[in-house]
Image (spheres, helix red, strand yellow):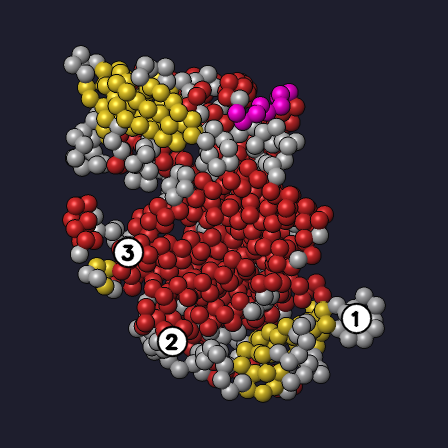
Amino acid sequence: MQLRDTPAQQRFREELRAWLRAVLPTLDRQPSQDDWPARRSYDSHWQALLHQAGYAGLNWPAEYGGRGATPTEHLIFLEESELAGAPYVGVNFVGLLHAGPTLIAEAGPEQRERHIPAILRGEEIWCQGFSEPDAGSDLAALRTRAVLDSDGEHYVVNGRKIWTSHAEVADFCELLVRTGPPDGPKHQGITWLIMPMDTPGLTLRPLKTAGGSTEFSEMILEDVRIPVANRVGNEGDGWRIAMVTFAFERGTGFVAEVVWARRRLLEIAALARENATWEDSEIRRRIARLAAEFDALWALVKRNVSEAEHSADGIPGPGSSVFKLRFSEARQHLDDLHAEVRGRDSLAFDDDLCTYDGEPGYERLRSLAYTIAAGTSQVQRNIIGERILGLPKEPKEPSAASAAKGDGR
Amino acid sequence: MDFRPTQDQLALAGAVRDVLGKHPAPGTPGQDGPEPGVGGVAGALWRDLAELGIFGVRVPEADGGLGLGHPESVHVFEELGRSLATGPFTATALAATLLPEYAAGRHRVGLGDLTGGAPQLLEHLDALDALLVIEIVDGETPGVAGHSQVLRVEPIELRADAVPHPVDPRVPLHRLRQKPLRGEIVGDAGTADALLREGALLTAAYQVGIAAVLTERAVAYAKQRTQFGRAIGSFQAVKHLCADMFARAELARAAVHSAAVQLADEAVGSDGADLPAAAAAVSAAKLLADDAAVANARAAIQVHGGMGCTWEMGLHFYLKRAWALSLAYGRAAEHADLISESL
């Protein structure tokens, strides 16, 4: 049980630091959050730089152009990038964290060759078409329907998808559709398709968040024709394929944010000393408690990573649900505490920040989604209760009709 | 980096658990338990644990200890917490790091932190062979007065009254009437800080043991108890209580292990290790572990429903111990203040 770098890890860390020191000053100022074309070009440029330097697809197998790095090296990369203030993965999030790993695990050779190098170079942007207005936490209830056309070579897709990040600039969408009967077993009959975003019949509607961000869209699909050749895996096997990506998302999605949160807490402490809210022992101790929480979360990440490094598949285990649950709540406490230390200044957005990233009022509103996205806190507690602790599942719901009758009496 | 416990650490924990399994404490499942001996210490359990070497985990082998480090110590103390073993385990293990004659566990050593002034409640006084007292030095000697020091005191020298009704009936208490008049100085302010720091770490590990074992008990009960025609653990309202218990114990354990590793790195002077950071990590571990033990004890009682509040179910023993330990080796506010100084 130790936390020290091995000589190889130390070397990896030092090379990365040196590269970040050299390359970060060459970057332009980050574009405004609402300027999507500029964001795409900024994030793609960063991804291309990572690719040239051999840091793209860090944890992807070398045979697919990745670096084949260990989970610990991946953690070092996330930690050092965040400490150095490097750009986030941005619009490449879905391609690098969801679609790419899924294609590596499940796609055919042609699909891999077509997409994986382009994702790694930052030339191909992906978005995710999973959630629907009536299928959120209960994702398997999704109803977007794909019917095989009479030509036998296309699926004709109709339905609505929601919470699609970066849809405006995406080239492709990882789309979950129902190919089985609508009233069949809900986890079966789901299929994973690659949808080109320029396919006719696709309409985007921006979905503005409480923080004013236009990161999300709703996608309306009307008779969208997707080639059968774009199917990944077998028809009806989409649920299992989608679950592979979720393990990745929960395992690594928020890791870098712990580093950010610890740094933000130091800024809050400095501000509190400056404006004398530090004299309030309750504020001071709440800051200290959050520091304890984030340090423990960071330790938990290291334990999860150590376990992944020594597991057969390198996929984070269910322990990542504990991390997701506690981090998302701590993150909201952090933003609330920041607002309390700022006092009435927290009522105004900071005009000097051209982007939303880091603006405390915006972050406070953005963090509302933390306990919801990537599995709500309630879903995480079910996962912990059922998959880790072995508690029984809720019995199957009675049908809506009989439940309504029961209510009536 | 490999933050997983080593095979040796797991084996040590397993050996301690085996011994503890032979001496079930009152309140553990199915046990009224043996009456503890003089001063609330079960003599046979103490001897068997001493034989395993748990009091000299961090004492060099040349001095009769196991020659191991903080990561091993916290594994031992988490097991003690799981079994709710009572006795001056922490203080005796701390004393052994200072005075190797205590490594074998032939003596029982208590600890009184009088830096906040007397009177003070002391645990297990009738069972003690020696008492370490941490106090502030009186007088005017420059560099010493106003700082803390560590005294070794003969229990017989103390003027103390037995507390007739301690909240935790398994841990007898005495109220100290005044500071000890005589004692042998065995450590300076640095030693005192190190003792309190390590005591906080071991106590945190014990609290993690309480938090973890209560999660297991609550889960087992939630699977077996039925109401409304099904196991209560299938209701999300109960399931989520259990999930939160698990999360608290896991997070607190990660904090305890991280603090143990940082303190061990600091002790051997590893690159990048520094004492203020390690001390803050210990305080973080104590805060989280105290919270986890107390909150999980309450949650375990809640999951057990009405029976959870009864004497015979025994969950109250865990809650009472968790309360007492959260006041030992630094209260929450003190640890929070220590952390805030590092920010």
Q: At numbered mark 2, what does the secondary structure look like: helix, strand or loop?
A: loop
Query: Can I make out residue B267 in this image?
Result: no
Q: Quadrant of residue B337?
A: bottom right
Q: Is residue A27 magenta?
A: yes
Residue at image x 20%, y 31%?
A: A189
Q: Which residues are magenta?
A: A26-34
Q: Which mark is residue A142?
A: none
Relative height, residue A11 to residue A49 (above, below): below
Residue A194 lies within the magenta run: no
Please identify the quadrant where the C terminus of chain A is shown.
Answer: bottom left
Q: Earlier in the sequence, mark 2 or mark 3?
A: 2
CA separation in Å, label 3 and label 1: 60 Å
Same chain assignment for discs 3 and 1: yes
Q: Residues within 10 Å of mark 3 (few under 14, many from 20)?
A: some
Query: Disc 2 designates what residue?
Result: B26
Can residue A371 be seen from the camera position used here? yes
Instruction: Tell me if mark 1 has few (under 14), some (14-19) or many (20+) residues whose alpha carbon lies within 10 angstroms of its own.
Output: few
Most common SS among magenta residues: loop
Mark 2 vs 1, N-terminal side: 2
Chain under callout 3 = B
Which residue bears the numbered disc 3?
Answer: B235
For residue B145, which numbered disc appears in the image? 1
Chain under callout 2? B
Image side of residue A367 versus residue A161, left or right: right
